[in-house]
Image: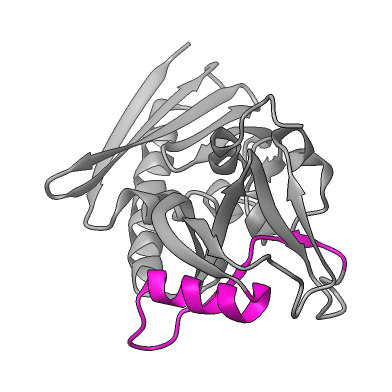
Amino acid sequence: MPHLRNTTLVDVPARTVAGALLEPSLLGGRGGVLCAGDEVASPFGPVRVERADETGAEVVGAGLRLVTELKRTGGGTLVVDGLSHGGRVGRRLALRVLAARARVISLRAEQLAAARVVVGAAIVRDGRLLVQQRAWPERDAGRWELPGGRVEPGESDAAALERECAEELDAHVVAGERRGPDVPLKPDLLLRVLTATLVSGEPRPVEHRALRWITAAELTTLDWLPADRALLPSLRPLLPRTAS
């Protein structure tokens, strides 16, 4: 199977570049956020997303395999695209596609680096993750997400997360490290998740319909908001399989 490779250096953190890879437009699709298991109608035919996380992405189908790896360097993030195909795509066309894809990834990553941020909190206690069910707006009511909210001008991600959890959960948390890719919500807005430790107070649904502490086995059973669903591969390692 012929294999082609293209590399480009982007002066943007790897987790933000990973967010650009989650947009279906990179594969010729439209709208939404890519998650593992999704199928997209690409110009070459239907393809399936095998992996989409902070390390890169892998797409298979229509006689091809596209693997994108992200490597952190002193000068930014090296994006390495590897395309294997069964001869359905000519070499020149494939190289043009990879070059165009690299330009789009670079541009979108730079846009996301300047985007406004919504922070989400991955709060784990006794092997369970805290999630909340939306009460509004009507189109999202009943769906699940991580606690959090928008970062205000001049506010750090950590300070915003701690403030939002106090407002939404009536509990005090301490922000930790970033987790997963920066997930695009709008052209100029992204979701960034940080781990958080519950310090005091028992969380309650101040603004939401309900709260739940879920196990790893329950991660895929909820009706998640699309952006939060894209983060499941990054959240799963936080939860032991034995929690009950």
Near-viewer residue (142 or 103): 142
How far across and how far down the image is residue 102, in percent?
35, 48
Query: In the displayed structure, would residue 178 be above or below residue 47?
Result: below
The stretch drawn in magenta includes residue 153: yes
Number of marks: 0
Query: In the displayed structure, would residue 236 be above or below residue 212?
Result: above
Give the side of residue 167 with respect to residue 5, left or right.
right
> In percent of the image, x 87 and y 79: which residue is there?
138
The stretch drawn in magenta includes residue 25: no
> In percent of the image, x 55 and y 38: which residue is there?
238
Give the side of residue 29 with respect to residue 217, left or right.
left
Q: Which contiguous range is marked in magenta?
A: 142-170
Near-viewer residue (10 or 128): 128
How far across and how far down the image is residue 149, in percent?
57, 76
Near-viewer residue (174 or 144): 174
> In percent of the image, x 57 and y 46: which residue is there?
27
Query: In the displayed structure, would residue 3 be above or below residue 107?
Result: above
